[in-house]
Amino acid sequence: MKRYGPPDALVSPRFAGIATFLRLPFCADPAGVDVAVVGLPFDTGATFRVGSRFGPRAVREGSLALRPAYNPSQRVAVFEELSVVDAGDAPVVPGATQPSLDAMRAALAPWHAAGVTPLGLGGDHTVLLAELRAAAAVRGPLALLAFDAHADAWDAYFGERYTHGTVVRRAVEEGLIDAHRSTLMGMRGGLYGAGDYDEARDLGLTIVPWDDLAQLGTGVVSQAIETAQGPAFLSFDIDFVDPAFAPGTGTPECGGPTSAQALALLRACRGLDIAAADVVEVLPDLDPSHITATLAATVAYEILTLIACRPKAAGAIGEVGSPGTSGRPEASGRDGAP
Ligand code: MN
Ligand code: MN
């Protein structure tokens, strides 16, 4: 079986080569792949500053700083557990939301059908709807775990129902996520009305504002994993992090977590059954020193690590780190492929 991973950084230095994510092989064939990194360069759904269509490119460039072979925080040799490729970018139609959602969903569907876990790089958060449509078609309704300064659960923005601020409500309405299994963490900043969070909670979603998350810490994440019960989508909007640490984003909200706090909360997602995931809302034009792109790449790498240590499919044996196990889900339908 083919295996895909990054080149040895002590043979080919990290600044050399073509800037795919982690310099992984570019590959469009799902055979032998566990995780496919897919760029989603769409920002027509953004309601404030635009430019996250260049996010995937920036995150790939930012990923060159990483040393990905071993993650000491989770004690995982990620690419001994997972075969990972960069599948390039999904097609989009600039300025046209519905055709873009269709095109991105269609690009992601074959990966899900082959049992591969897509890791999306946004793009504004509208891309989540395409990702969830592709995932739910194969996996059924998912739990959504999101780190975000915003709940993205408004009904409409300027009369538009398909924007980065409304996708969570659309996902509930379309039955793509099970609201009662879903937790959104990190909300802060001003609202349009006193009842905004209550309206989101009325959908069944658990909303944990940053002020509460800051007090309660990783226990909230443990609770969210327990509530998720089954396949989940893990979504990380980079504006979850304080703009002092992640200035390159379209709708910054001050007073959020440091990058260290955010990474600790993300690492606490170990044990989540991740069916798909993304990192979104990176806006490189506002990103001096590539600080946001480097953080977003780190977040994507931590998510890869979480995928490497997600619970095994029924019938599989062994835990990540124990010798003689591949760490790959056995129910993927891919293992019989030539
Ligand atoms: Mn968002
Ligand atoms: Mn946000």
Image (spheres, rainbow, N blue to C red):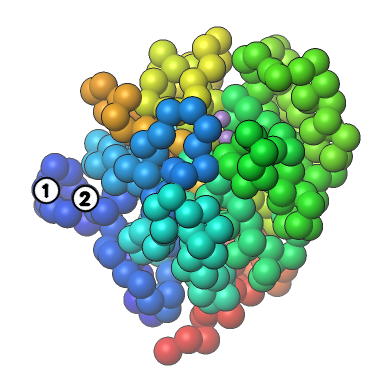
Q: Closer to the camera, 97 or 223?
A: 97
Q: Is residue 81 above or below residue 239?
A: below
Q: In the displayed structure, does residue 186 sit left or right of residue 65?
A: right
Q: Which residue is mark 2?
A: 19
Q: Residue at x 41, y 23 (%)?
A: 246
Q: The disc labelled 2 sits on which kind of residue?
A: Ala
Q: Residue at x 81, y 45 (%)?
A: 179
Find out whether the residues at labels 2 and 1 contact each other: C-beta distance under 8 Å: no
Q: Around disc 2, counting alpha carbons within 10 Å, would you say few (fewer than 14), some (14 to 19), or many (20 or more)?
A: some
Q: Which label number is shown at residue 71?
A: none
Q: Which label number is shown at residue 16?
A: 1
Q: Closer to the camera, 155 or 104?
A: 155
Ligand 1 near label 2 (Cβ, under 8 Å)? no
Q: Around disc 1, counting alpha carbons within 10 Å, would you say few (fewer than 14), some (14 to 19), or many (20 or more)?
A: few
Q: Residue furthest bottom?
A: 338
Element under disc 2 = loop
